[in-house]
Amino acid sequence: MIKKLNQLVVIGLLAASFFACKPDGAEYIDELDIVYTNYDAGFDFNSKGTYALPDKVVKITDQFLNLQPGDEPEYLDPVYAAAILSSIRSNMDELGYTQVDQSVNPDLIILPSVSQTDQIFFYYDWWYWNWFYPGWGPGWGWYYPGYYPPQVSRVRTGTLMMQMTSPADQDASDKIPVVWTGVVNGLLEGSANSINKRVNDSINKAFEQSPYLAK
């Protein structure tokens, strides 16, 4: 799990560096959404016909990494979870798979999880100094005209990770292989409807760029 979280951090850093180099920046929030997919090239998806989905989406927090077997994790707000599960379900059905209950040994089990990060950005222009300095009193400072004071902004981002597993290929150490991974990352800004629409569009994109999943 830690390895996968580290991979997500790398993805986030790459995204941040990309937009930092973009002269005009993003004009709309959805331009900051990122979709990444990967899969086991040796896995035969065409031989699989059924899948199962949980009815909740796990929320990854700091406490999640310390959970013991049997502990109940934190779950994503049902308002967002329902939209995520519905989008995954519609894409799998469209690809030709049939959803079944986990108790009937499905060929594939898709496990969605979400993490949320609050990032603080501090902008400082070294040409400008205009805050309290001990012994000098408030407002002491100098600046070059046209430059702006330090600015602090807070950005909330969310990452959805979809892991498609193959229970039948469980090995002797009880490890179940992940045969497909879809990662969606974006800003958590706007109304619930707006966020759900962007997540749905991004999930659709993840399946669109994975044609090998089609039966």
Image (spheres, grey):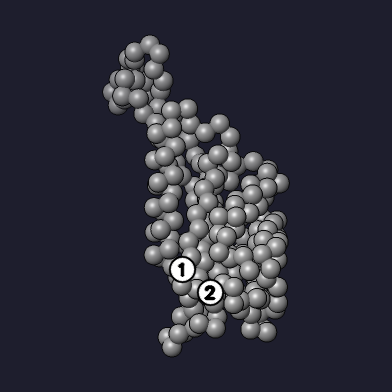
Q: Give the class, few, some or many, for how many residues have Cα within 10 Å of label 1's Cα (few <14, many ≥20).
A: few
Is 144 positioned to the left or the right of 68 in the image? left
Return the residue at label 1.
41
Indicate the quadrant where residue 141 lies: top left
Return the residue at label 2.
44
Labelled disc at residue 88: none
The residue at the point 34 percent across, 20 percent down is 128
Q: How many circles with numbers are drawn on the protein?
A: 2
Measured as percent of width and height from the top left, residue 117 is found at: 49, 51
When the figure is inspected, residue 18 is found, relative to residue 204, above or below; the finding is above
Indicate the quadrant where residue 95 lies: bottom right
Measured as percent of width and height from the top left, residue 111 is found at: 58, 69
- Report, in whole angstroms, how far the alpha carbon at label 2 lies from the one at label 1: 8 Å
- Which three-letter amino acid code belongs to the residue tagged 1? Ala
Work out which residue is located at the far top of the displayed protein and give it.
Answer: 145
Is 6 positioned to the left or the right of 70 in the image? left
The residue at the point 39 percent across, 59 percent down is 6
Question: Which quarter of the rendering shows the C terminus?
Answer: bottom right
